[in-house]
Image: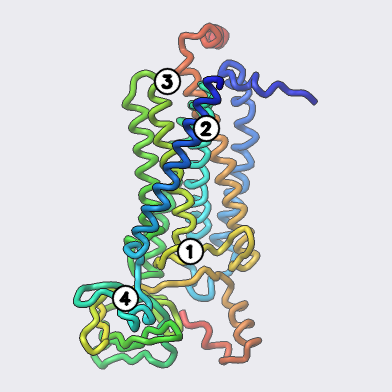
Amino acid sequence: MNINWFKYASPASFYPLAGKMIPWFAVPAVILAVIGLIMGLFILPPDFKQGESYRIIFIHVPAAWMSMVIYLAMAFWAIIGMVWNSRLSSMMATALAPTGAIFCFLALWTGALWGKPTWGTYWVWDARLTTQLILLFMYFGYMALHAAIEDPRRAARASGLLAVVGAFNVPIIYFSVQWWNTLHQGASITPTKSEMAASMASVMLIMAIAAWLYSIAVTLKRVRCEILDRERHAAWVAELSTEAK
Amino acid sequence: MKPRQKRMTIILGGLAGLGIVIALVLNAFQGNLVFFFSPSQIAANEAPEGRSFRLGGLVEEGSLRREDDGLTVHFYVTDTAQRVPVTYTGILPDLFTEGQGVVAQGKLDGSGHFTASEVLAKHDETYMAPEVAEALELAKGEMPASSSLVQ
């Protein structure tokens, strides 16, 4: 099968494709999230040390993972956009930012709520928590910079640079618990080991997949809006709006 | 070089340079990014004297002693090599128990006694059902099953 992938680098042909793809990600995301939440909050046994409070992990960890993955994806699209000068790539980067920021905030917030009953505090300035807070500010900075520059191409270049520079923070967040003494515990699940009971780990995996699917669906939706906004003077958008009437 | 290749070279070169800068900065800050000091580091005089810092380790088994006021506790923090006596007056986090990880903020006096103003529990990355933990304890044969259900 020979598909011309570059065809879909054009906003005009990606716009309808994205529209068709959204339900294929959104529907499974909802189903998996419902299964994961019911399993995680009601069916799984409590933890041997933390009791019921550990259940927030099923939101906290997928949200934290997602906030890091989305930032890397944002930096990836920003680099592609800068090197190949492709408009769609920088639109992808822009479309990812709000979802990443929401997951980042969710990770910090659930972490604070979890920290109080287990550690005895909402917040400490240890390396893991601080670098994750920096990630939230990087998202805010990216969105603010992008919104502050009128010309879309200059906005994409300036904010893209910020996205790429900030990407160095992501490995620091991930490895902070290994490199330094932190109050935050180490990773329960890494590619090589799992310190979680298999049933709990699999529910966390379900929630993580749901977070991925949700992020893809929402980003596609947002990139469609972005395409329409930036291409509003293009002939194909005018055709689209006359078709709708 | 085509303009695209030139842009790619500039970006990759910039990233490599930035990566080196960040690695050097982190390396230089290594000491300041330490959230707590271990009893061994204190024994080696690495902890700051006369000002507040954090001490981290495990609450030594059998060392926890409560005073009659119900708020003041004495215990030893150990990293299995060294241990530091700690006094704390206040409310302890739920997860605080003997054998559990702990991070205490406070000052060290001349005699090597640590007075804590705040005690935080540090838990590890292991999660399992109470029944499983109980079965593991039984298998190890260290203590009766009921005592593993502390919380």
- Which residue: 36% across, 90% down? B64
Q: Earlier in the sequence, mark 1 or mark 2?
A: 2
- The residue that label 4 is drawn on is B46
The residues bearing labels 4 and 3 have C-alpha atoms spaced at a distance of 52 Å
Q: Is residue B50 left or right of residue A115?
A: left
User: Tag 1's secondary structure?
Assistant: helix
Name the chain letter of the residue that bears numbered label 4: B
Residue A75 x, y percent position in the rendering: 49, 37
Q: Is residue A244 visible?
A: yes
The residues bearing labels 3 and 1 have C-alpha atoms spaced at a distance of 40 Å
Residue A70 x, y percent position in the rendering: 50, 41
- The residue that label 1 is drawn on is A178
Which one is in front in this view, the residue at disc 1 or the one at disc 4?
Answer: 4
Q: Quadrant of residue A46?
A: bottom right
> Furthest residue to the front?
B1
Category of crowding for the residue at label 3, using alpha-carbon neighbours closer than 10 angstroms: few (below 14), some (14–19), many (at least 20): some
